[in-house]
Amino acid sequence: MLDEARRLAPRFAARAADTDRDGTFPVDDFADLRNAGFFGLMVPARLGGAGAGFAEYAEVAYELARGNGATALVFNMHASVTGALSGVTDELAEALGLPADALAARDQHLKAAAGGSWYAVAMSERGAGSRLSRLTTTYEPVDGGYRIRGAKTFCSGAGHADAYLIAARSAGDPSQVSQFLVPAGDGLRVEPTWDALGMRATSSHDLHVDVTVPAAALLGGVEGLALAVAQLAPHWMVASYAAVYVGVARAAVDAAVEHVLARSLTGLPAVRARIGRADAAVAAAHLVVREAARRVDEAPGDAETNRWVWRAKLLAGSTASEVASSMLEAAGTSAMRRGHPLERLYRDARAGSLQPATSDVCADWLGVDALGGDPDTDGVAPRW
Amino acid sequence: MLDEARRLAPRFAARAADTDRDGTFPVDDFADLRNAGFFGLMVPARLGGAGAGFAEYAEVAYELARGNGATALVFNMHASVTGALSGVTDELAEALGLPADALAARDQHLKAAAGGSWYAVAMSERGAGSRLSRLTTTYEPVDGGYRIRGAKTFCSGAGHADAYLIAARSAGDPSQVSQFLVPAGDGLRVEPTWDALGMRATSSHDLHVDVTVPAAALLGGVEGLALAVAQLAPHWMVASYAAVYVGVARAAVDAAVEHVLARSLTGLPAVRARIGRADAAVAAAHLVVREAARRVDEAPGDAETNRWVWRAKLLAGSTASEVASSMLEAAGTSAMRRGHPLERLYRDARAGSLQPATSDVCADWLGVDALGGDPDTDGVAPRW
Amino acid sequence: MLDEARRLAPRFAARAADTDRDGTFPVDDFADLRNAGFFGLMVPARLGGAGAGFAEYAEVAYELARGNGATALVFNMHASVTGALSGVTDELAEALGLPADALAARDQHLKAAAGGSWYAVAMSERGAGSRLSRLTTTYEPVDGGYRIRGAKTFCSGAGHADAYLIAARSAGDPSQVSQFLVPAGDGLRVEPTWDALGMRATSSHDLHVDVTVPAAALLGGVEGLALAVAQLAPHWMVASYAAVYVGVARAAVDAAVEHVLARSLTGLPAVRARIGRADAAVAAAHLVVREAARRVDEAPGDAETNRWVWRAKLLAGSTASEVASSMLEAAGTSAMRRGHPLERLYRDARAGSLQPATSDVCADWLGVDALGGDPDTDGVAPRW
Amino acid sequence: MLDEARRLAPRFAARAADTDRDGTFPVDDFADLRNAGFFGLMVPARLGGAGAGFAEYAEVAYELARGNGATALVFNMHASVTGALSGVTDELAEALGLPADALAARDQHLKAAAGGSWYAVAMSERGAGSRLSRLTTTYEPVDGGYRIRGAKTFCSGAGHADAYLIAARSAGDPSQVSQFLVPAGDGLRVEPTWDALGMRATSSHDLHVDVTVPAAALLGGVEGLALAVAQLAPHWMVASYAAVYVGVARAAVDAAVEHVLARSLTGLPAVRARIGRADAAVAAAHLVVREAARRVDEAPGDAETNRWVWRAKLLAGSTASEVASSMLEAAGTSAMRRGHPLERLYRDARAGSLQPATSDVCADWLGVDALGGDPDTDGVAPRW
């Protein structure tokens, strides 16, 4: 899949200027991903997928992002859903006491992905961010299923996904937060609010929800699992897009090199120093993302794994922003024209540190942890 | 005029999102500037102007830029032309041996400015940048004047100015570079090429020139003065827009403060630290711009003055870029939405270091100078 | 006095390596200062002094620090005492209801300074830092005066000053903190604890106090004035040494230039860029210190004045540290040898950000202030 | 050996303050290293050593440096000599046409190391730095061997090593530069010139050479091999001490954590943020050093390997310096007292970027390389 990702990246890059300018969804990129089987990347082989682990995902995301960060970011959401579903193994399901129906539903969702369906995530809400504890979208039991009502924001891929992972709170028991996989269609209305500085092609619009779903849509088959799953797989919430931003940073170095060569500016010492330092910074951030991903596969949720996840998020975000800014400065004013890769990458790269957990939050958590505290209770609250 | 600038800034700010988004010229801002008499800012009182010096200009530019950096940047070009014209005093003209006609033309241009006309600058060319020594636009004598032919780029305000300062090389004697003030109209064709990362409302389009002008259009009345004027007034070429970028940086701090207050994020230590450090950095850059401007008035072209001019350019550019980036990070993802001031300011601010002389060039010049060398001969060549 | 300071600086510089290496007091520098009349710098003319304001002090401190930062730092303590005393004008004294005796004592202390005496400050204590509210040194009334007992730390010039400003808490009423000017001699014992990374020649040793002083030693003649005075003159507590660190930073640039010229390294682009950027940063910090000092003279204690004081402290400290580090890197390994000015300056410069109020504290205060809060109550507590 | 290194590190740390203060050699650390068999680390098992590769060396160096960077730095020189000797395998020797005698000598040197001897490197000279092409130390053939004469500088471990690797130029044919392993004793005179900012315990004194050695002392048995060996093993010249500086940086984080915990400063957000960011930076630099070391073992001298070597050198040096400075700022003034680990680490850490190839040189090489140039011919010359 890695070779395939490398093959697709230049195609994505060639389309990136248009979707960025217009803020339209990279429909062709996603067709390429479907055709190449990427939607099954995280699906176990027994269900028709590639059975990739987190480390393999991270490498794929890095390569895709070298083509178009926005495409990679939307794909990350699908990978999160399928990766988390795959992570609920039969053993874990038994330990959690999940009903047999839930396993069948899980397999059905994953098979569909392997067959070419892809999923978006509708978690964040205005005011609540992505903090599960503050969600106001509710669900209540109805005949044969649940009715879900509320409004979501920052839903990447809205209007294009085949189904949406929607987090909602029980109207009857507000302490219960559950997740549903809701097919696109009636009851989900996209409000095209996404018009942002960077990552413009992600179509991260608002999603208005008033929909009734069958019982099988409740993930896990038991209410109230959302927090447990989040704690089991924090890497999918905190750092899965770290790889994307390192890819964006590398794309900025590549674009600067191409620009400088085309303009015969290789003799400028300041340009060389900028490119040299950027290259080293990106290489370092890439290794940190790899190490974090490797540990997620080996020991997900461990204290040391989480440390690497925070380091990866922190360094990917800050490196992307600093590198893209310096590469634009190395290339000069002509690279500021719209349509130039560096013009887009400079905007795309800035988003990394701001996505939760932000760089400042990660730095605080790492500091609290190094000082023997517990980031969950002693650290600054994330702006999710 | 400073109070007036402060009064206009919020009006400019209210319009900035629209012109930025569409890349349209801030027509209403320029109507405001005309009505308030700003086009005569640099015109001597005897010709109906405000008779401001460089220091007063710099303060005005800073205040205007707090409203809209793009507007301030275009105004800077007009100020450069009128400021440089005003700088050619009768005494200087005599010393240079300029003909009396030239003085009358100078006064006429300045009176027109005081009366509400404004001028753009058409200097840069693709491939040559703003290096006078590499210009390919030519002029040749014709009956009663000159015919000028060529193509210019980065002409801020193209299509809106009343006249354009055009630099061209003598077709007969390529060693002669002269400047003409050419009225808008036939012979000047705007090609709308400006579509850039930041400062989008400057309409810095390409200008195609094939025009015949009367002899009086030749500034100074003598051919070959362009380089001499550039050397007499390097501040107008290097640092007059430094004040603009400090204004942009201050606007970013202000926007972040407003955002953080509205979101009740004042309790976050990382946000406070970012704002505190940004405030100090902007205050420092502002002082440097003021000091440079003060010295330009006192001793234009002096070695120590030039040093301050380079420092101002260097610090204004780097401070604007770093501050805007940090303020966006302080404000968080919601400030990335288009139409949010910080989204625009982040893009506008990046242009500062890239405009000639770039930050890297200024750093080199300062280093060469500190080491006893001559930046003109020992320093890295500017990418003009 | 400024010219005189410039004359002395090279003499100080020539001695700096020895006192730094051995951690001995710059006795000869202080003899020079005495002979040139610097101890009367802040003393009103009517009492035989130079009657300098804070701005003049700041310029003098900057110049002295270009010679030896440690000497300038000790001198700063004397200037603080005499400056604060001079700041208690007759009008202010009347407004505060100070007894006539106190004015006579004030004049006597200032006259002595103009005559060649100099004062150190013994404020900080282990555990309490320089926070007046946590001092444990106490005083109690005895026949004809007070008995003061306790232990002080970080007392610059200990063992060399003619008298010490000692802050102590009333044993009878712990809410009262007062300040005494205690002559050197019996009852004051210096414990040579100062052996630090930088500013090694300040002899900032511990001072053990068990001394009985006459009533006239109580500054102001009334108990409990220490906090009031601190609030009236925060600049002497927060930022008077900002000028010192900018001088240290400038000395580092100068030393790097000299080294690079001697080694014929002027052709290295990275060296030139480092020196150019350092020059600009030091020039900016210098202007901020000047602006803060100017405002202290005009409107001491005003909100805007305090803002500039914090900016000055923040930028002086961080600039000194970053510049000295970069200049050492520009000069190369041979500048790491002990006795090389850059080797000392790198260590001296690091102290600036750490002295109260630290850079981090100043950043927080500026942020709180920009967000409309009150740094005194909403800001992080200084580590004084 | 890694466990052993971790066991020794705290012992080294406990002694580091004394040897740093006095600038004395860490004799006890080296006795520990001898007793634990570290001198045979790079010696093949068949000759009684541990047969470690470069990656294992790098991990050991990192751990030793967490105890005392100076000790690790001297040990690095011994590892360089033994590592380079071990790198001349029988196959390589045959390919190079080395005489059989040379192999026997190689084995003898390595056996001696495994038996407890250790070697220093005497390469640099004043004026020439470590550039082989500029050395002025000469050798000439004499009966039964060679006479070597000259003066070396920066010879770490001078006066303590059992033998010295000395580079010299043929008096007869200046194009030939050869290396000799010269036993301590008559003919080698140490001039105690080393008295530096940091890494004070390395005893990197001058070495005056006027010695006659037997023919077997000529490494490789053939004249003129020095450059070839340098090209075969650039990692030993450029980056073997990168691991040392990452260890120093980690030690600074550890010392700051300990200090902050002891002072109960864990509640300060700025302190936490500093420690968190430092932790991430050190973790990243460590991974880069590991990756470089891994590639050196797999494909020494390859273009991609060299890239990682430069990245490792660049990031180790800059990270160490920045982290140590920030950790000192996190800890506060009390950590500036001599004897406090952070006081020493701040000085030790600064040396990393300055050792050849400097950070600025590595940045240039990486930039030239990324732009398709050849750092050897197009890059800035190292200040060796």
Image: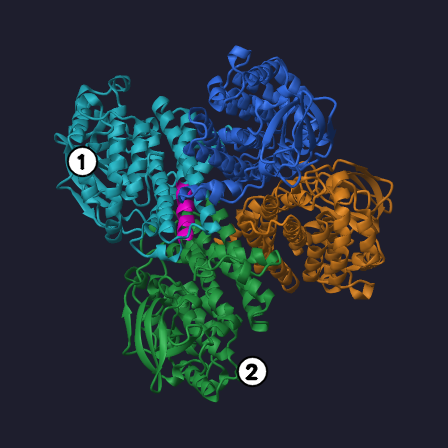
Chain colours: A orange, B blue, C cyan, D green
Q: Position of residue A174 (x, y in %)?
A: 70, 42
Viewer-closest of B285 and C144: B285
Q: Is residue C319 magenta?
A: yes
Q: Residues within 10 Å of mark 2 (few under 14, many from 20)?
A: few
Q: In this view of the protein, which residue sits in the foreground, B109 or D254? A: B109
Relative vertical location of residue A338 with respect to residue D159 in this rendering, above or below: above
For the C terminus of chain A, the quadrant is top right
Q: Tell me the kind of residue under disc 2.
A: Ala
Q: Nearer the viewer, residue C308 or D376?
A: D376
- Please identify the quarter of the rendering in which residue C40 is found: top left
Instruction: Give the distance between the C-alpha atoms of the residues marked 1 and 2, in whole angstroms.
Output: 76 Å
- Residue C34 got which mark? 1
Residue under disc 1 on the same chain as residue under disc 2: no
Q: Chain of mark 2?
A: D
Chain holding disc 1: C
The reply to whether the magenta stretch includes residue A323 is no
Label 1 SS: helix
- Determine which residue is flagged by label 2: D95
Which quarter of the figure has residue D244? bottom left
Task: Give residue A57's position: percent from left, percent from top.
Answer: 71, 59
> What residue is drawn where x is 39% and y is 35%?
C286
Q: Is residue C133 visible?
A: yes
Residue span colored magenta:
C317-331
Q: Is residue C161 left or right of residue B137?
A: left
